[in-house]
Amino acid sequence: MSMMFASLAEKLDGIFKRLKNRGRLTEKDIDATLREVKLALLEADVNFKAVKDFVSRIRVKSLGEEVLQSLTPAQQVIKIVNGELIQLLGGSRADLNRSPVPPTRILLVGLQGSGKTTTAAKLALLLKDNGQSPFLVPADMSRPAAVKQLLTVAAKAGVPAHSPTPGSSPAEIYRKAALEAGRSGSDTLIIDTAGRLHVDEELMDEASSLAAMVNPHDTLLVADAMTGQDAVRVAEAFHSRISLTGIIMTKLDGDARGGAALSMRSVTGVPIKFVGTGEALDGLEPFHPDRMASRILGMGDVMTLIDRAQKAMEEKEAEKTAREQLKGEFNLEDFRDQLVRLRSMGSLQELFSMLPVPGRMKKAIPAEVDEGEIARITAIIDSMTPDERRNPKIINGSRRKRISSGSGTTVTDVNRLLKKFTEAKKMMRMLGKGKGPLGKMGLPT
């Protein structure tokens, strides 16, 4: 996600930095700033009408007495921009519609190549992890490969799926699948429909007739963020025929300009409900407009970072580990486990992008983070004996040579790791004694 909005975030950061240097603001200052904001959004491929309305609303609010008379007018303007950006992105989190009487029926539509079939399995896995019982229905009989793909990813996700009889119509598939899902106790049906390379009447007719039969509680368009404003036009076409209730943006971790995500709600009136953040089956996240706005404005996304951390480490295990480590019972096995959990939360570059650090500090973060460093550290620790991992003080010169040889690294690499570990352990002790920032906050020990 960070790559897609990196250019826009950088430009906005520069614009607001210049604004902060002006002190009190005049109408001329605000107009000049908004011209730059408008240009930055247009260059990010945001819909022209959406940009025009967005900038107009900001101008009206920014020319109010609260801003012009403020001692910190630039911060007031940024606050206004943040609020309007949240509204542009949808205002608040749009959740799935749930049926009071199971099963909830979710219809997925979209063009071929948007990642619809994989997204069906990702959504099923997300619901499964949240305690629900999803059931996948492959209703795309135009491509036998699509059925096979869905059955494959369903098996990987550990989610049941209907295996249709060759030659069956989408309507027949749905009827049989619904009966099968009912017998298995599933509470959510996710129906993957046919796709085409572009919008055509045959596709729309099939989607609308299936929608009429299924009467879904949610009709979600799977849209490829990399296609820019084409994705917005596809959403408009589908919405006019089958009344979409939500959108799943895929490939939001790509390097496109991000205009589709910023335009979608404003142009179509349909909220983004989920975003795809990677190819892995766990690469689907609920969409939070406020969190996305914060990331675009360089304020970080701490809440998503926390969500990922909680997912990577169960609460009770985290509390137990924290207590032990703050008491100084922190060894190289703990160090390795923490690194592995950190890596499971996503790429280090993406995690860095979520941290709310000032622009000048962001420059200290390398453009390309060495993802192989964790693999090297893990290899070094794995080459140690259990006694060495639990009591690093016994690692003398000969042991360091053996460890470096076994891990395919150098003695210098081993020395560097041991130094990092010593610093980490020292920090843990400080936190446990209340000398560090977290200790002063009263973290239980």
Image (tube, helix red, strand yellow):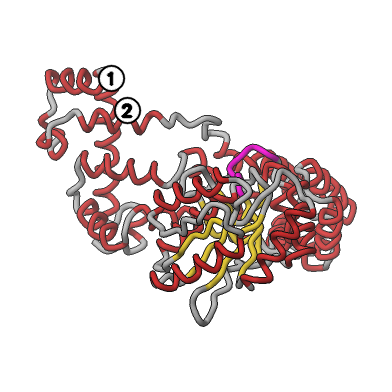
Q: Is residue 404 visible?
A: yes
Looking at the image, residue 66 lies above or below residue 221? below
Q: Where's residue 32, x and y in %?
A: 86, 47
Residue at x-position 54% and y-position 56%: 138
Q: Quadrant of residue 185?
A: bottom left
337 displayed left or right of 161: left
SS for callout 2: helix
For the residues labelled 2 and 1, say whether their Cβ atoms are less than 8 Å apart: yes
Residue at x-position 71% and y-position 58%: 85
Instruction: Report, in whole angstroms, how far the alpha carbon at label 2 lies from the one at label 1.
Output: 8 Å
Residue at x-position 44% and y-position 68%: 180
Q: Quadrant of residue 168?
A: bottom right
Residue stretch in magenta: 250-256
State the predominant SS element of the stretch in magenta.
Answer: loop
Name the foreground residue: 211 vs 394.
211
Residue type (three-letter) at the residue carrying disc 1? Thr
40 displayed left or right of 146: right
Residue type (three-letter) at the residue carrying disc 2? Arg
Asked if residue 251 is among those painted magenta in the image, a careful observer would answer: yes
User: Which quarter of the image is occupied by the C terminus?
Assistant: bottom left
Q: Where's residue 175, x and y in %?
A: 54, 69
User: Which quarter of the image is occupied by the N terminus?
Assistant: top right
Query: What is the number of the mark on residue 376?
Result: 2
Residue at x-position 43% and y-position 70%: 186
Name the foreground residue: 109 vs 300.
109
Residue annotated with mark 1: 409
Looking at the image, residue 231 lies above or below residue 187? above
Mark sitting earlier along the chain (2/1): 2
Q: Quadrant of residue 423?
A: top left
Q: Residues within 10 Å of mark 2 (few under 14, many from 20)?
A: some
Q: Where's residue 191, x and y in %?
A: 56, 61
